[in-house]
Amino acid sequence: MSILINVAELQTCLVSATPPVLLDVRWALGDPNGREHYLAGHIPSAVFVDLDTELAGHGQPEDGRHPLPSEEDFAATVRRWGINSGDTVVVYDDAGAAAAARAWWLLGYAGFKDVYLLDGGLAAWRAADLPLAAGEEQAEPGDAVVHFGAKATIDADQAAAWSGILLDARAGERFRGEVEPVDPRAGHIPGAVSAPTRENLAADATFLPAIELRARFAGLGVEPGSEVAVYCGSGVTAAHQIAALEIAGFRAALYPGSFSAWSNQPERPVATGPSERGASGGSGSNGDRVEQ
């Protein structure tokens, strides 16, 4: 079953006897005004989700910029959004699902089965000339139960020893170490393969068809039966990569701490430069320069 829902399908669901819970995850790196954007206009009935406070916990720098929230805190958050056990949930943003995918992944990790990404997000809704609502939506508290662990994760030690395909979902220039706007060291985890999330999307910010995504990931070394793990800067856009992999028919584990955690641990080596696309993991792919 697809993890995507399009605008026409969402319209039908919203007027059904059992409409989905709709979540607006308006967030982008460097833009702290997600709530203001939501208040100015959102899909009717959508509840605002704050990525920094509701989809992430708080820890030390070595835990990363967006560590996972605690199970207890996330359970309270989910109920506050109005989610009940057995509900269908649809999440969207205005950034090609880069932020919405974090909510999609975290809800899946918490055991929710019917969670979908609105393909094309708010832009697709607007393009269909559909109405927007302003102000805050108030949800009736839900009774959903949360159990973490339904999706696979790895930690830093497992990332260091990963023998499968380790995909880096950040922009190529950050992978190569040419720029690093937020984290203390530039580069990537040795052995990782560069796989920028923007290449998962078509020009209209919808996901590429499954057949094209399969071809894309095949070019990165992902084959049926491959063990795949994904990281990014702080575990947000890596969830987008995992969504694209699922559309293509693959499963992958998330390294939640991602490079923000890795680069804050001085004992962890960092590689710079390009790596061989489609390399089969392992330490020091061709082209990497590894530094402590």
Image: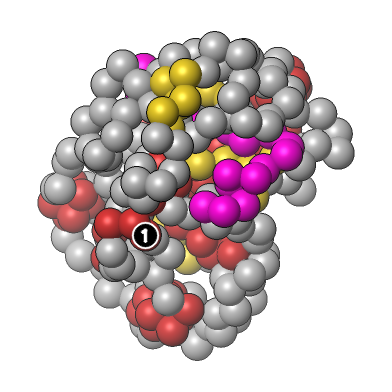
Q: Is residue 120 above or below residue 44?
A: above
Please state the horizontal and vertical placement of residue 98, each as a whole percent of the image. Answer: 42, 39
Q: Is residue 30 above or below residue 177?
A: below
118 relative position to 52: left or right: right
Please state the horizontal and vertical placement of residue 59, each as a whole percent of the image. Answer: 30, 67
> At 53% from the left edge and 23% from the top edge, which residue is drawn?
194
Residue labelled with disc 1: 63
**Which of 264/204 is in front?**
264
114 relative position to 184: left or right: right
> At 57% from the left edge and 53% from the top edge, which residue is drawn?
157
Total numbered circles: 1
Q: Quadrant of residue 233?
A: top left
Residue 116 in sight in this render: no
218 relative position to 245: left or right: right
Q: Is residue 187 above or below residue 108?
A: above
Residue 38 in sight in this render: yes
Is 32 inside the magenta-drawn segment? no
Q: Estimate how packed mark 1 is, as few (under 14), some (14 to 19) or many (20 or more) residues with alpha carbons within 10 Å.
A: many
**Which of 267/113 is in front?**
267
> At 25% from the left edge and 39% from the top edge, which residue is drawn?
184
Please state the horizontal and vertical placement of residue 100, each as a whole percent of the image. Answer: 43, 48
Q: Is residue 29 above or below residue 39?
A: above
Q: Quadrant of the C terminus?
A: top left
State the residue lying farthest toward the right.
225
Q: Amino acid at mark 1?
A: Asp
Q: Quadrant of residue 39?
A: bottom left
Secondary structure of the residue carrying tag 1 is: helix
Span highlighted in magenta in the image: 156-175
**Which of 217/291 is in front?**
291
Q: Quadrant of residue 81?
A: bottom left
State the residue lying farthest toward the bottom.
143
Is 174 inside the magenta-drawn segment? yes
